[in-house]
Each structure stands twice: as structure tokens, then as C-alpha cells.
Image (tube, rainbow, N blue to C red):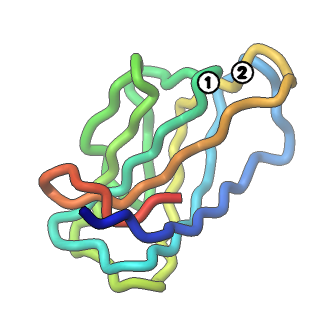
Amino acid sequence: MSLPGSLDSKLIYPNKITFSSDTTLQFTSTTEHDIPTPGFIRVKIPNDCVIIDPPKTSGLDLVSFESKTGTIILNVPNGLNKGTPISYTVSGIRNPRSFQPSDVFTISSVNDEGYVVDQG
């Protein structure tokens, strides 16, 4: 059994965050391993945030989303070489209903069989 490699992601928040409002988040991710073709980025949002049906994306195409689990799958159409940053945005995430500390976003690169390649 092998463990996933690391995936370094930066999340850029909007200038003004309003609780319980819809927002657009910008991510930049860099993987330890190549993202294969076909390959995907999986974004798991914190439990206290909500995905608005359907979320909108740019930079990568939306493949699927699951509101109940807070999971968004994005297509990386041509794969990606390790160490190459990739930027993408996701609109339609509703902020938590308070400013209390929140859980974290989990970003993973996965292959076409759903196996995690890198995670961060």
C-alpha cells in the first residue's frame, strides 16, 4: 500500500467575507506527482459551508458535485506535470453562518479510478 503524496494548495479569499453569503474562492495547487490523463482535482469543502446547486468553475471544468458530502470534482483535461501550479476558481460556496473557527478545505488529485495521487 502506498500513501498519497503532498499537494500544496493556496486559497485566496475575497476581500470581504460575509457570513452565510455566497462567495467565489480561488485556489492554486501544486502537486508532488504528475496528474495523469485523465485526472481530476477533488475539492472537499468544510462541513459548515454549503455548495449551491450547481457550483460554477473556471480554470478547470466541473465534472460532478455532491452537496451532501461537500465534494466537487474538476477535470484536468491534459494531465499536469508535477510541480506545475494550476489555478482554478469555484463559485457557489455559501460561507458558514458565523465567524467561528471552521474546518479546512481538503484538495486532492485523483486518477480516473478515483485513487488519490496527492492530497493536501
Query: Whole-percent x and y of residue 42?
Result: 38, 48
Q: Quadrant of residue 20?
A: top right
Q: Which amino acid does label 2 sit on?
A: Pro
User: Are there few (<14), some (14-19), or many (20+) residues within 10 Å of tag 2?
Assistant: some
The answer to whether 102 is drawn above or below residue 76 in the figure is: above
Residue in view at x 72 percent, y 21 percent:
96
Residue in view at x 36 percent, y 56 percent:
41
Q: Which amino acid does label 1 sit on?
A: Cys
Q: Quadrant of the N terminus?
A: bottom left
- Do tag 2 and tag 1 residues touch (Cβ < 8 Å)? yes
Query: Whole-percent x and y of residue 57?
Result: 43, 46
Residue in view at x 53 percent, y 52 percent:
89
**Image check: 34 left or right of 93?**
left
Which one is in front, 18 or 38? Answer: 38
Q: Mark 2 points at which residue?
A: 96
For the residues labelled 2 and 1, the Cα–Cα distance comes to 5 Å
Which one is in front, 63 or 36? Answer: 36
The answer to whether 44 is drawn above or below residue 8 in the figure is: above
The answer to whether 46 is drawn above or below residue 119 in the figure is: above
Q: Mark 1 points at which residue?
A: 49
Query: Whole-percent x and y of residue 101?
Result: 82, 30
Residue in view at x 82 percent, y 26 percent:
18
Query: Whole-percent x and y of residue 29?
Result: 53, 67
Mark with earlier residue (2, 1)? 1
The answer to whether 103 is drawn above or below residue 63 in the figure is: above
**Image check: 95 left or right of 87?**
right
